[in-house]
Image (spheres, rainbow, N blue to C red):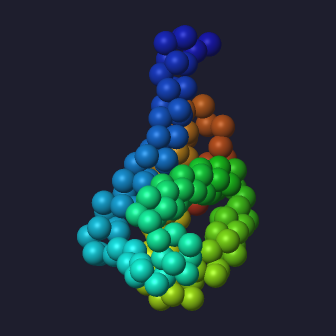
């Protein structure tokens, strides 16, 4: 039987993956990918009027909503991957693309969307592998070790 203190530490370890996926993911994408590439959303006054978002407050709201959407998509992807359901990854990318399709006609927006989406998926994949490794090495072993593929022998 496991001690209560040990149980609590393991549960806290699992819980810490949520801010890693959410907040650290946002930081990774913004500071590690977008800013070093010098990628910015450039919207002319004409585009702003065309989109009905001429004000800076509207663009800020759009960017904050994008961060929340990105964090939720990473949580869904990680959940799908640790459960061995790769179709979740396909579904999230498809839904995101369909939702943003009208904006993708503008090259800068399309490039920004693609860079952000790929960085978000990369972070989700790395988080899923880290969660699976934690689960097999220190956690309860609730996720199948077979999901780790070739790195499963390294865990033992």
Q: Residue at point 64% right, 82% down? A: 102
Which is more toward the observer, 42 or 120?
42
Q: Residue at point 42% right, 80% down? A: 45
Residue 20 appears in the picture as rendered: yes
Which is more toward the observer, 37 or 7?
37
Position above or below: 122 against 17: below
Name the image quarter holding residue 20.
top left
Position above or below: 147 against 12: below
| Quadrant assignment for the N terminus | top right
Q: Residue at point 40% right, 82% down? A: 44
Q: Is 82 left or right of 124, judged from the image as shown?
A: right
User: Where residue 100 sits: x, y (%)?
Assistant: 62, 74
Q: Residue at point 48% right, 31% down? A: 13
Residue 111 appears in the picture as rendered: no
Position above or below: 56 against 105: above
Which is more toward the observer, 65 or 125?
65
Q: Is 92 left or right of 4, judged from the image as shown?
A: right
* Count of picture labels: 0
User: Where residue 98 sits: x, y (%)?
Assistant: 69, 75
User: Where residue 15 sits: x, y (%)?
Assistant: 53, 32
Q: Is 33 left or right of 112, judged from the image as shown?
A: left
């Amino acid at each position: 039987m496991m001690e209560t203190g040990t149980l609590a530490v393991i549960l806290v370890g699992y819980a810490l993956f949520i801010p890693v996926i959410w907040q650290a993911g946002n930081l990774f994408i913004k500071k590690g990918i977008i800013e070093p590439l010098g990628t910015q959303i450039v919207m002319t006054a004409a585009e702003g009027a065309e989109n009905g978002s001429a004000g800076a407050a509207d663009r800020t709201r759009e960017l904050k909503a994008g961060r929340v959407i990105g964090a939720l998509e990473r949580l869904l992807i990680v959940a799908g991957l640790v459960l061995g359901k790769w179709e979740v990854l396909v579904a999230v990318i498809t839904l995101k693309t369909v939702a943003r399709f009208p904006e993708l006609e503008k090259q800068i927006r399309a490039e920004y969307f693609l860079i952000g989406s790929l960085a978000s998926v990369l972070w989700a994949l790395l988080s899923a592998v880290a969660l699976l490794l934690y689960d097999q090495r220190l956690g309860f072993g609730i996720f199948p070790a077979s999901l780790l593929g070739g790195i499963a022998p390294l865990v033992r």
